[in-house]
Image: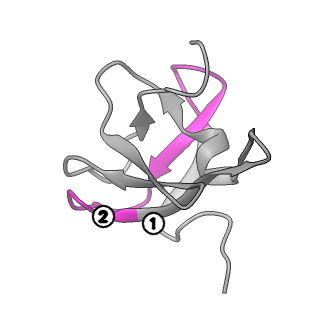
């Protein structure tokens, strides 16, 4: 069953930019969070996971490609209430 966001994440106002993704509970390092972007005919489409995660030069998540799909996983433990960040590579910040 598809969920727009994993159950351990929610969207709320961010001090960084507009809204962001936040942990509802502690998330361990290496946790795969799900599909963030799709590449179709050279155009990038974001899922809610990819659309609400904010940029940081010191991120706590990373994306990786598989068959024209991009997924997000944590690269360090994330505490409950902490915002998730990704270093943007598709867009200018």
Please indicate whether residue 85 sits to the left or right of residue 46 in the image: left
Q: Is residue 30 above or below residue 16?
A: below
Percent from the top left, x then y, of residue 87? 41, 28
Q: Which mark is residue 8?
A: 1
Please indicate whether residue 1 sits to the left or right of residue 16 in the image: right
Residue placed under numbered mark 2 in the picture: 31
Q: Do tag 2 and tag 1 residues touch (Cβ < 8 Å)?
A: no
Indicate the quadrant containing the C terminus: top left, top right, bottom left or bottom right.
top right
Splitting the image into 4 quarters, where does residue 67 fall? bottom right
Q: Nearer the viewer, residue 28 or 39?
A: 39
Indicate the quadrant containing the N terminus: top left, top right, bottom left or bottom right.
bottom right
For the point 26% across and 50% down, the residue is 79
Q: Describe the colour scheme in one phrase.
A: one colour
Please indicate whether residue 47 sits to the left or right of residue 21 in the image: right
Percent from the top left, x then y, of residue 41? 80, 46
The local crowd at label 1, few if under 14, some if 14 to 19, many if 20 or more residues have their Cα within 10 Å, is few
Q: Is residue 41 above or below residue 19?
A: below
Q: Is residue 44 above or below residue 64?
A: above
Q: Which mark is residue 89?
A: none
Which residues fall within the magenta stretch?
A: 13-32
Residue 71 belongs to magenta span:
no
What is the total number of numbered labels drawn onto the structure image? 2
Question: What kind of element bears circle 1?
Answer: loop
For the point 55% across and 29% down, the residue is 14
Splitting the image into 4 quarters, where does residue 25 fall? bottom left
Q: Nearer the viewer, residue 46 or 54?
A: 46
Main secondary-structure element of the magenta-colored stretch: loop
């Amino acid at each position: 069953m598809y969920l727009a966001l994993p159950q351990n994440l929610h969207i709320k106002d961010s001090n960084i930019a507009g809204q962001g993704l936040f942990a509802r509970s502690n998330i361990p390092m290496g946790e795969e969070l799900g599909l963030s972007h799709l590449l179709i005919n050279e155009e990038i489409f974001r899922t809610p996971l990819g659309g609400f995660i904010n940029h940081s030069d010191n991120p706590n998540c990373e994306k990786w490609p598989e068959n024209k799909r991009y997924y997000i996983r944590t690269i360090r433990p994330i505490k409950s209430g902490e915002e998730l960040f990704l270093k943007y590579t598709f867009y200018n910040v």
